[in-house]
Amino acid sequence: METENWKQWREFFAARSERRLPGLDDPQDYSALPKSLARSLAVFQLGESGGGSIVQQAAGSTIPAAGPDYASAMRLFVAEEHRHAAILAICVRNLGGTLIHQHWTARLFVRARRLLGLRLKVMVLLAAEVVGICYYHLLATRLPAGRLRSLLAQVVNDERSHLHFHCSFLRSQVTTGWRRRVFVATWRAAMFVAAGIVLLDHRHALRDMGLSPSTVWRRWTAYSRLAERLVCRTPVPVDADLALLREPDVPRRVLHEVSASTV
Ligand SMILES: [Fe+2]
Ligand SMILES: [Fe+2]
């Protein structure tokens, strides 16, 4: 997909918008899984529920690279995030957990985005994509085969598209050497803060699912560097993000299955 080709992105998201939600009930027994997993997914579920204001901001933006197709693509992107919220709500329910309606990280995320212009807001969304891709993927690799794992893999697949969508926009804005330097410094700081918050807030689920902070941190760092290279036009192999998902840190037994389902 070419940079700034928002019509293609709009059509891409529109084609996916017809997907039906999975059914509510899952016959699998998840009682052996830790309670902290349901709580952790409930926090992510809340995070996936917001994002409406960026649609208006994209529609009203005077940035030349934005336009009606970009605004339409953004609206479909937000709808896809809301679909993730619905999927995660099903996962939380099947894990025996409870949905939440308020959380300090969600409030912080919303407040931070309200203060920002479109460019910085997209960068914050990109940080959320990197966090989500790695977190959902690593959790999926620790789950038994079944619907919960395949639903998380499906969400990872969507988040990979979102990462490229946001990188396309930011690439159109980072056109000079000094802009690249400002982006890299701001991006690394944003990722550091986002990753630190998630490591702290989700430490119980990470521990209970057998994921060490260093494993998660390493994965976030690799993915954030990939996003940085995509924005700064540093050549990267095709499907480098998929290759990252296939890297170690996951048990060999489930590696193939999860990677295959995220293609
Ligand atoms: Fe999402
Ligand atoms: Fe996303």
Image: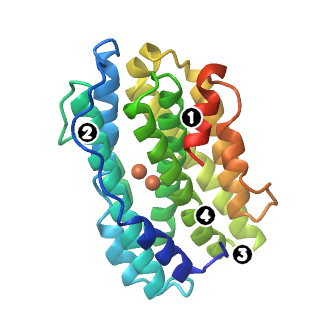
The kind of residue on which mark 4 rests is Cys
Q: Mark 4 vs mark 1: which is more N-terminal?
A: 4
Q: Are marks 3 and 4 in contact (CB under 8 Å)?
A: no
Q: Is residue 261 above or below residue 10?
A: above
Q: Mark 2 vs mark 3: which is more N-terminal?
A: 2
Q: Are marks 4 and 1 in contact (CB under 8 Å)?
A: no
Query: CB of residue at label 1: within 8 Å of ligand 1?
Result: no
Q: Which residue is mark 1?
A: 258
Measure the C-alpha gap from mark 4 to mark 1.
24 Å
Measure the C-alpha gap from mark 1 to mark 3.
36 Å
Q: Which secondary structure lies at badge 3? A: loop
Please indicate, yes or no, whether residue 251 appears anywhere in the rendered image: no
Q: Which secondary structure lies at badge 4? A: helix
Q: Mark 2 vs mark 1: which is more N-terminal?
A: 2
Of badges 4 and 1, the one in the foreground is: 1
Query: CB of residue at label 3: within 8 Å of ligand 2?
Result: no
Q: Mark 1 vs mark 3: which is more N-terminal?
A: 3
Q: Which mark is residue 175?
A: 3
Identify which residue is drawn at 28% across, 14% down. Answer: 31
Please state the horizontal and vertical placement of residue 134, each as a whole percent of the image.
Answer: 55, 38
Measure the C-alpha gap from mark 2 to mark 3.
42 Å
